[in-house]
Image: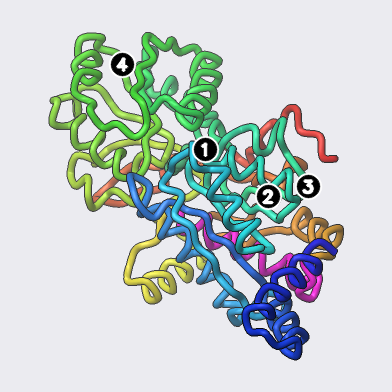
Amino acid sequence: MTTRRLVLTRSAALVGAASSALLLPTIARAQSNKVRVGLMLPYTGTFAQLGVAIENGVRMAIDEKGGKLGGREIEWFKVDDESEPSKGVENASKLVQRDKVDVLIGTVHSGVQMGIQKVARESGVLSLIPNAGVHAATRALCAPNVFRTSFTNSQPTLALGKTMVDKGHKKAVWITWKYAAGEEAFEGFRDSYTKAGGTIVKELGLPFPNVEFQALLTEIASLKPDAVACFFAGGGAAKFIKDYAAAGLKGRIPLYGSGFLTEGVLAAAGPAAEGIVTTMHYSDSLDTPRNRQFRLAYAKAFRLQPDVYAVQGYDTGQLLALGAAAVNGDLNNKQALYKAMESATIDSPRGKWTMSKSHNPIQDIYLRQVVNGENKVIGVAAKALADSGVGCKMT
Ligand code: PHB
């Protein structure tokens, strides 16, 4: 009902501009016929490459289904969110209020996601999260219209601590950007590492998106831990890996991380990345027909190698296409739409996954190591890992 009212309002404005009442039915029909898809992603800054990979993935999945959603053509709307939390609400509102999108796909940065979450809860717009892992989105602030296709920030690191202790690293330093993603990744690391018997000797941090790592690396050298664990991503991750090696720490203090550290940055980081061990819900080298076929098709379409962000975008496109098909393109049939999305099994390049009750993937977490410039799978660190979803009440 809301959509219909909004369409008519907008049409009325256009009609006024064209000063012909006869245009009304045509315009109203044309507009309501297309599904309006909003992309709110970072296209500038340290996460720019992540935004592009996600958009590519979304488009690829929908193209594979004939380029339509539930039989309807698509009109795309894009906003560069710059990974800037202070503009989160404003940018999400541009898509929802101004562009009247039927679905908002976004974003990468956890702080910006909180702005989207606010707008999604207030407007009821279908919100698909293709990356940002902020816990609240699928815990205390979960909502029937919000679905995440990626992870919660502590999911990958919950599988990291035991691996490190098993390798004999009993004392570790943690280092990250100080914002929700880094702090919540730390929670997963802390819980798993201390439970396995490890001791965290120091937590180090710097504000996002700073990359002045030198003083912190000097501190790590003097602390002499058995190992270092971290959360960094995008351009900042490539610089951290290079600076870690340049500071003489590579080969002396093993570097671990949630897998974002080595996603999409291996070419940029070069030999400095060799040997890094990470945990993550995807790996380039997953030797399955599904992953091989996906990687080939993506490389052909975009002349780029896909990474976890491309996979998450792809799965977002798959989820949306599946939901739209279940309601024959009538995205206002919310009950049926949400039900289809809640009960979906996504045939992902990462392996098949399903939605938890709080709308977050239940998925395997792989143990990976960088070997010859590739994230090689060296084991499964956790099978069918679900986030706790603590505090989530779907209303
Ligand atoms: C986040 O801010 O939630 C975030 C950003 C980049 C990542 C992972 C998580 O690679």
Q: Is mark 1 within 8 Å of ligand 1?
A: yes
Q: Mark 2 sits on what residue?
A: 147
Q: Kindly state the secondary structure of the residue where label 2 is placed.
A: strand
Nearest to viewer (mark 2 / mark 4): 2
Cα–Cα span, label 3 and label 2? 8 Å
Label 1: element kind: helix
Q: Residue 199: x percent and y percent?
A: 43, 10
The residue that label 4 is drawn on is 226
Give SS at disc 4. loop
Q: Amino acid at mark 2?
A: Phe
Q: CA distance from mark 4 to mark 3?
A: 44 Å
Q: Residue 267: image x %, image y %?
A: 23, 53
Do residues under tags 2 and 4 come within 8 Å of each other at their CB atoms?
Answer: no
Distance from disc 2 to disc 4, alpha carbons, whole Å, reads 39 Å
Indicate which disc, 1 or 4, sits on the residue closer to the N terminus.
Answer: 1
Instruction: For label 2, count other residues whose C-alpha is less than 10 Å away and answer few (under 14), some (14-19) or many (20+).
Output: many
Q: Is mark 2 within 8 Å of ligand 1?
A: no
Residue 187 horizontal/vertical position (percent): 53, 22
Task: Using the numbered discs, state the Cα–Cα distance from disc 1 to disc 2 in whole angstroms.
Answer: 15 Å
Upstream in sequence: badge 1 or badge 3: 1
User: Which residue does the numbered mark 1 point to in the structure image?
Assistant: 110
Q: For the magenta stretch, what is the residue range?
A: 309-331
Q: Residue at x 37, y 40 (%)?
A: 233
Task: Sort mark 3 into few (<14), some (14-19) or many (20+) by Cα contacts within 10 Å.
Answer: many
Residue under pointer 3: 144
